Every structure is written in C-alpha cells, then in structure tokens.
Image (spheres, rainbow, N blue to C red):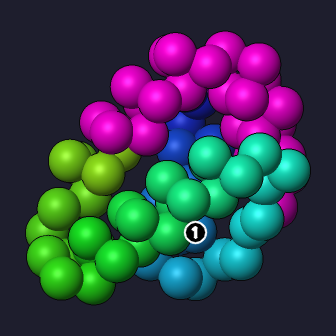
Amino acid sequence: MDTQAQEKLEKVLRGELRYTSGNLAFNILITKMQKKLQADPGGMDSCMNEIELFLAKYPIVAKVDLANIAAL
C-alpha cells in the first residue's frame, strides 16, 4: 500500500473522511476497524495490519479501492 492511500485510509478509519466501497466485505471490514479504533484509539497499527491481510487475499479489491481512497 502506498503512503498516500495509507494516510487516507487511516483518516477513513478515524472518521475524518467518508468512503464507501463497491465491495460489501471491504465495507464491513472498514466498519469493524472503525469500531475497534473507537474502543482502542491506539490500535491503528493492528487495524492496518488486518486491512493489509484482507487486501493481500483480494488483490482486485486492493487495486480498485486503494486507488479510489488515494483519490479522496
């Protein structure tokens, strides 16, 4: 994941930016990570690792959604 996409994805997880994917599973993961961060604000690294694992399994989702997030 490039730096710009990662920074914007962190903002999405913190609720500073709004993003909705065309992929339901990715939307669910984002919501889950947002709730996890609300419960533990210091858990950004853990959330990003979980997202990285998901995107490694689904490279097409990664390609499309990371490009869209970087463009926010």
Amino acid type, label 1: Val
How crowded is the residue under tag 1: few (<14 C-alpha within 10 Å), some, or many (20+)? many
Q: Report which residue position mark 1 lands on.
A: 12
Q: Is residue 57 left or right of residue 71?
A: left
Residue sitting at 58 percent across and 83 percent down? 16
- In the rendered image, residue 63, in percent from the top left (x then y), is placed at 77, 24
Does the image show residue 20? yes
Q: Is residue 42 left or right of residue 72?
A: left
- Indicate whether 40 appears above or below 7: below
Number of numbered labels in the structure image: 1
Q: Would you identify the image quadrant in which residue 40 lies?
A: bottom left
Q: Report the magenta stretch's main SS.
A: helix
- Indicate whether 59 appears above or below 42: above
- In the rendered image, residue 8, in percent from the top left (x then y), is placed at 61, 58
Residue sitting at 33 percent across and 39 percent down? 50
Does the image show residue 7? no
- In the rendered image, residue 18, in percent from the top left (x then y), is placed at 71, 77
**Quadrant (top left/top right/bottom left/bottom right) for the C terminus:** bottom right
Q: Is residue 59 magenta?
A: yes
Q: Is residue 11 magenta?
A: no
- In the rendered image, residue 62, in percent from the top left (x then y), is placed at 68, 27
Secondary-structure class at tag 1: helix
Residue sitting at 43 percent across and 40 percent down? 51
Magenta region, residue range: 49-72
**Quadrant (top left/top right/bottom left/bottom right) for the N terminus:** top right
- In front of the other: 29 or 8: 29
Residue sitting at 39 percent across and 25 percent down? 53
Q: Is residue 55 left or right of residue 20?
A: left
